[in-house]
Image (tube, rainbow, N blue to C red):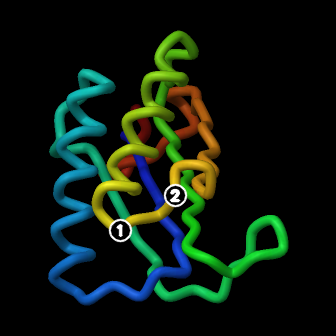
């Protein structure tokens, strides 16, 4: 159900990217109280990106999930920002996150919907 896409202009070796998505997957599942077997994480590293007129390290994240709890958004933002900062040294004020809540009937899986 949860889908987290990470885009960054930081070049990452495959081992670093793999470690990051595994960590983020587990922590996102835990924070949302959802089984990790449903969490999908993707990363696009080394992208040409600019933020605030600067091409210094940055990241853009999109977290989509069924019934994303509005009351947890601030905590999720803190958690994800700290994970990105700690893992790939992106300054916390250079991380944007878009949160999207999807109705169950609008999320497909295994030939059906939730």
Quadrant containing the C terminus in the rendered view: top left
Q: Secondary structure at mark 2?
A: loop
Picture coordinates of residue 36, whole percent (x, y) = 18, 41
Q: Residue at x 39, y 56 (%)?
A: 84
Q: Estimate how packed mark 1 is, as few (under 14), some (14 to 19) or many (20 or more) residues with alpha carbons within 10 Å.
A: some
The part of the image, by quadrant, that contains residue 16 is: bottom left
Res. 57 image quadrant: bottom right
Quadrant in which the N terminus is drawn: top left
Please state which of residues 23 and 108 is positioned toward the viewer in this rendering. Answer: 23
Q: How many other residues sit within 10 Å of disc 2, few (<14), some (14-19) or many (≥20)? A: some
Residue found farthest to the right: 53
The reply, left or right, for residue 64 in relation to residue 53 is left
- The image shows residue 31, relative to residue 111, as above or below, that is above
* Residue 103: % across, % down: 57, 27
Please tell me which residue lies in front, 109 or 7. 7
Q: Which residue is mark 1?
A: 88
Q: Quadrant of residue 20?
A: bottom left
Direction from residue 98 to residue 112 in the image, left or right: left
């Amino acid at each position: 159900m949860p889908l987290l896409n990470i885009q960054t202009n930081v070049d990452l070796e495959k081992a670093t990217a793999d470690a990051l998505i595994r960590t983020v997957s587990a922590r996102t599942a835990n924070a949302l109280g959802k089984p990790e077997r449903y969490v999908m994480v993707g990363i696009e590293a080394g992208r040409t990106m600019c933020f605030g007129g600067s091409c210094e390290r940055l990241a853009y994240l999109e977290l989509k999930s069924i019934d994303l709890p509005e009351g947890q958004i601030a905590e999720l933002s803190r958690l994800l920002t700290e994970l990105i900062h700690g893992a790939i040294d992106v300054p916390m004020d250079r991380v944007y996150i878009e949160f999207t809540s999807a109705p169950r009937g609008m999320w497909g899986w295994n030939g059906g919907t939730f």
